[in-house]
Amino acid sequence: MNLFNVYPLFNINPVKAQGSFLWDDKGEQYLDFYGGHAVISIGHNHPHYQTKLKEQLEKISFYSNSVQNELQTELAEKLGKLSGYEDYNLFLCNSGAEANENALKLASFHNGKNKVLYFSGSFHGRTSAAVSVTDNPKIVAPVNFSERFIKSEWNDIEQLEKTFELHGNEISSVIIEGIQGVGGIMIPTPEFLSKIKDLCEKYNTVLILDEVQSGYGRSGYFFAHQEFGIEPDIITTAKGMGNGFPVGGVLIHPKFEASNGLLGTTFGGNHLACVASIAVLDVMKEENLIENAQQMGEYIENEIKDLPHIKSIRRKGLMIGIELDSDCSEVRKSLLFDHHIFTGNSNDKSVLRILPALNIKKEQTDLFINALREILKNR
């Protein structure tokens, strides 16, 4: 049997990782400035993370949600305290797409409405409803398409208002990323988010903040939307939540009423997933990683903002989009093959996406800064 060939792969085979570095099967070292799509939040193989997972493996690694699991309670309490959402409830699942699926379903159960408003440039996942609110026709199969999913333009308040005038009584939820990642690090304006919140309240519509990539301290706030003082009805999270262990979560306002069987999952909230997630929160708190994300992100921007060929820098914390004056693919390849630095791209081909671990150090950022400086000055 062969693998189903859906991924364009670099000819690099990482076999070891520590902190912000990877090593391939030839012993070559690479700086990880992308974290596997913002998944590596506290660095590869953090000692506390490793210890907690090893300890749990010697106890129990899995049982279903038909029994009590005190680790789920501990995770919910610590997540509530660190995020500032102590009064919300937590549903645990396995991925960002699954979190968004459950958020959309819960919203529809809550108000009985069946349409969803999403925005241009969005990416919410590849599963049924999540891909239907993702702005990429190439990955939306005919079976996923429905007129129930309505697209509005990003940061366009006028179109937003018109859409609610036409469909407001049918719109169950609005789903929006705290910061668009795949879309090219697109940041919503405070006015846009405020208007969405106002319209949701007016029309009994559920506001879902997708913080799958922009959450968990990535933006310099625990969740990106918290900079703007917006309180959503539902928040979804995943990527940095488990530092590489598959886990996702839905933070749910207390106005939503739970009932047996309303939502469900086989693997979500398993013992190993909970321990991984608790370890991430412990490290974030003890090492002040949200503050570090603010400081290191600002440092990187200040060091590169005057380099040639950079049109703009879109950044919150360590979620950074570097817009070049041409396609970024050659710059990205040079960073990887000439300087051994992993970076990312986006749907905007000119945007180089930077998502290092939240505990990145200055000397490690300097490796990237110096490499980018050399590449851009020689273009």
Image (cartoon, rainbow, N blue to C red):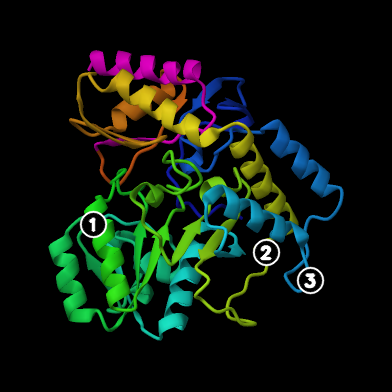
Residue displayed at 58% across by 55% down: 80
Do tag 2 and tag 1 residues touch (Cβ < 8 Å)?
A: no
Q: Nearer the viewer, mark 3 or mark 2?
A: 3
Q: Position of residue 363 (x, y in %)?
A: 49, 15
Q: Is residue 117 left or right of residue 232?
A: left
Which amino acid lies under the numbered mark 1 shown in the image of this protein? Phe
Residue displayed at 44% across by 71% down: 128
Cα distance in 3D space between marks 2 and 1: 37 Å
Residue displayed at 61% across by 47% down: 242
Total count of labels: 3
Q: Which structural element holds mark 3? A: loop
Which amino acid lies under the numbered mark 3 shown in the image of this protein? Val
Q: Position of residue 153 (x, y in %)?
A: 19, 60
Q: Which mark is residue 297?
A: none
Of marks 1 and 3, which one's residue comes earlier in the chain? 3
For label 1, the residue is: 192
Where residue 25 sits, quadrant-wise, is top right
Do tag 3 and tag 2 residues touch (Cβ < 8 Å)?
A: no
Q: Which structural element holds mark 2? A: loop
- Please provide the residue range marked out in magenta: 350-379
For label 3, the residue is: 67
Do tag 1 and tag 3 residues touch (Cβ < 8 Å)?
A: no
Residue in the foreground of this view, choosing between 150 and 190:
190
Q: Quadrant of the C terminus?
A: top left
Cα distance in 3D space between marks 1 and 3: 43 Å
Asked if residue 320 is among those painted magenta in the image, a careful observer would answer: no
Of marks 3 and 2, which one's residue comes earlier in the chain? 3
Q: Position of residue 174 (x, y in %)?
A: 33, 68
Q: Which mark is residue 267?
A: 2
* Farthest right residue in view: 58
